[in-house]
Image (tube, rainbow, N blue to C red):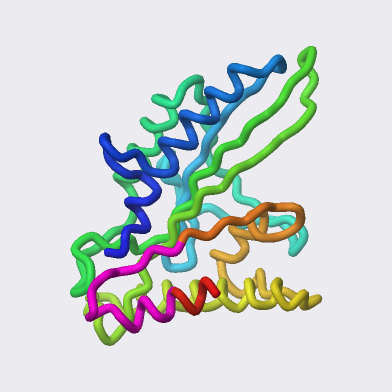
């Protein structure tokens, strides 16, 4: 694979984004005078359905309107980076993966790991901040991936296509945005709309066989 999931998790010797952010977050909060509470949640979007990766329950319903989509998923308060990583690793065991001709361990779901930080003063809630870390599913071309369930790959590529369309609409400052056209874009509304700050990490394959995918990825990033 190109390394999207590895970028998130990393290894013991080279921690990924989630371990690094978790460690830095608790370090920063310990140096501040207010009281803070850190909680996490972990969900995945698979075949246009949302599933909680931290609690076994039926598929989650996306509620709300175009102004505010949300899902009622499990949240766990964490007191240390170790507790965060324990939940992250447990959730990863439930993620949808499959072997394809292009990747021996391709993520077949979009996963959203969320930090929620609440700031208190004298037991009064002053502020709520969120950080969403999204690991998008592999976008192997249908003609090359040879996965058994072609509907699965079609659903993945469709949601990524809608995401690309949405980002283009935002860049062009269009009035009507296509959040409702896929479950993924509904989940990402809080991350790429309003006063959110959005950062995209592009992961490219070095293989010549994947040149078409590399070009598409760079085009998406541009």
Task: Please tell me which residue is depicted at 21% across the width and 71% down the height of the picture.
Answer: 100
Q: Position of residue 91 (x, y in %)?
A: 37, 42
Q: Quadrant of the N terminus?
A: bottom left
Q: Is residue 99 left or right of residue 18?
A: left
| Along the viewing direction, whichever of 118 and 4 lies nearer the viewer | 4
Task: Please tell me which residue is depicted at 77% across the width and 60% down the height of the picture.
Answer: 67
Q: Main secondary structure of the magenta part?
A: helix
Q: Position of residue 211 (x, y in %)?
A: 31, 81
Quarter of the image for residue 20 reads: top left
Q: Is residue 183 left or right of residue 18?
A: right
Q: Is residue 148 left or right of residue 121?
A: left
Task: Please tell me which residue is depicted at 54% across the width and 43% down the height of the picture.
Answer: 114
Span colored in magenta = 202-217
Q: Quadrant of the C terminus?
A: bottom right
Q: Position of residue 195 (x, y in %)?
A: 75, 53
Quarter of the image for residue 151 reads: bottom left
Quarter of the image for residue 187 reads: bottom right
| Along the viewing direction, whichever of 197 and 159 lies nearer the viewer | 197
**Is 205 part of what is drawn in magenta?**
yes
Q: Examine the rendered structure and indicate whether residue 90 appears above or below residue 69.
A: above
> What is the number of callouts on the image?
0
**Is 188 part of what is drawn in magenta?**
no
């Amino acid at each position: 694979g190109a390394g999207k999931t590895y970028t998130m998790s990393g290894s013991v010797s080279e921690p990924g984004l989630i371990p690094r952010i978790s460690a830095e977050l608790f370090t920063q909060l310990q140096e501040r005078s207010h009281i803070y509470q850190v909680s996490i949640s972990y969900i995945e979007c698979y075949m246009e359905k949302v599933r909680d990766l931290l609690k076994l329950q039926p598929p989650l319903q996306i509620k709300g309107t175009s102004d505010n989509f949300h899902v009622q998923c499990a949240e766990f308060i964490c007191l240390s980076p170790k507790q965060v990583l324990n939940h992250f690793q447990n959730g990863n065991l439930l993620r949808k993966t499959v072997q394809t001709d292009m990747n021996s361990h391709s993520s077949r779901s979009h996963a959203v790991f969320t930090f929620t930080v609440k700031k208190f003063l004298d037991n009064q809630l002053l502020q709520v901040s969120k950080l969403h870390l999204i690991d998008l599913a592999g976008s192997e071309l249908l003609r090359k991936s040879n996965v058994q369930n072609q509907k699965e790959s079609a659903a993945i590529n469709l949601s990524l296509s809608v995401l690309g369309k949405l980002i283009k609409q935002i860049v062009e400052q269009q009035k009507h945005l296509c959040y409702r056209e896929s479950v993924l874009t509904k989940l990402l509304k809080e991350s790429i709309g309003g006063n959110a700050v959005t950062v995209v990490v592009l992961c490219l394959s070095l293989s010549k066989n994947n040149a078409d995918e590399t070009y598409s990825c760079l085009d998406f990033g541009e």
